[in-house]
Image (cartoon, rainbow, N blue to C red):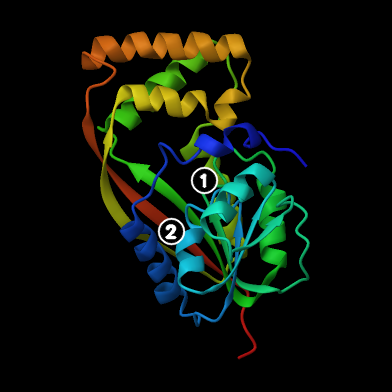
Amino acid sequence: MTSAFDSVAASFDRYRTVPDQALVAIRKTIWDFTGMPESSRVLDMGAGTGRFGHAFVAAGDLYVGVDISLPMLREFQARNANACLVQADGGQLPFHDASFRVVLLMHVLSGAENWRNLLCEAVRVIEPGGFVIVGNTTGSMAGVDARMKRQLNHILGRLGASWADGKKSREEPLEWLHIGASRRMQMMAASWTAQRTPREFLDRHRKGARFSALPVDVQEDALNDLGRWAEKTFGSLDKVFSDEFNFVLHIFKIGTSNG
């Protein structure tokens, strides 16, 4: 099995770090709001390099991380040798029905073309009364990352490139889960401030899996155009900004338990 993330695994976390205290807060919020005992089995679909899984592994939770990209899982394993990791397609999970009490989808659904398969599998492996939890990072609309992203979307639209808007691409999967859920909760689990530069945004997207799937000439034209816009707008690609970020959890209770 191969993945678009294979080639970027080694550098994936460089500009995508979530502070440790935020990761601890995200884990705590999940246990607090689901009411599940910490002995519950947790499946992390799209575990990647372990950005979110590390907190569960460090706490000794019954955690299983799944990802289609073996290089990404190797990065995870390098930091957590004891992590239980499985290479598998999220649309065809190698687990029995009702095998887990909590299923995590962190930064997975944005732009996922096979989201229905992913969610069907997530629901299948959940015990009755268990929880599917979707998580994503949101930033200030006035932040440099948000401004760069809006301009990039504008440029790609002008170039006629097919590009999924992250927010819009999450709405349909969330509604799909909501329809079948017996309960839905949404809360902000963590907040933090990070230093950002326009150049880091360019580097991050140059190595991003979805962006790198675009035609090479489109990638180069878009980033060159965006770089020129950023220099004119901000004065320098290396100007440092303090951006504020929040991590939002969408928690869905699936069915009802027998207890």
In this rendering, does residue 6 appear at all? Answer: yes
Where disc 2 sits, the SS reads strand
Looking at the rendered structure, which numbered label has been put on residue 249?
A: 2
Res 224 quadrant in image: top left
Horizontal and vertical percent position of residue 117: 72, 51
x 45%, y 49%: residue: 136
Q: Distance between the Cα atoms at labels 1 and 2?
A: 13 Å
Label 1: few (<14), some or many (≥20) within 10 Å?
few
Horizontal and vertical percent position of residue 176: 61, 54
State the residue in front, 158 or 197: 197
Looking at the rendered structure, which numbered label has been put on residue 171?
A: 1
Res 150 quadrant in image: top left
Horizontal and vertical percent position of residue 89: 74, 50
Up the image or down, 168 lies above or below 54; here it is: above
State the residue in front, 38 or 83: 83
In this rendering, does residue 189 appear at all? Answer: no
Up the image or down, 85 lies above or below 239; here it is: below
Horizontal and vertical percent position of residue 212: 59, 24
Q: Amino acid at mark 2?
A: Leu
Looking at the rendered structure, which numbered label has been put on residue 22?
A: none
Query: Is 97 positioned to the left or the right of 28 in the image?
Result: right
Q: Earlier in the sequence, mark 1 or mark 2?
A: 1
Up the image or down, 83 lies above or below 157; here it is: below
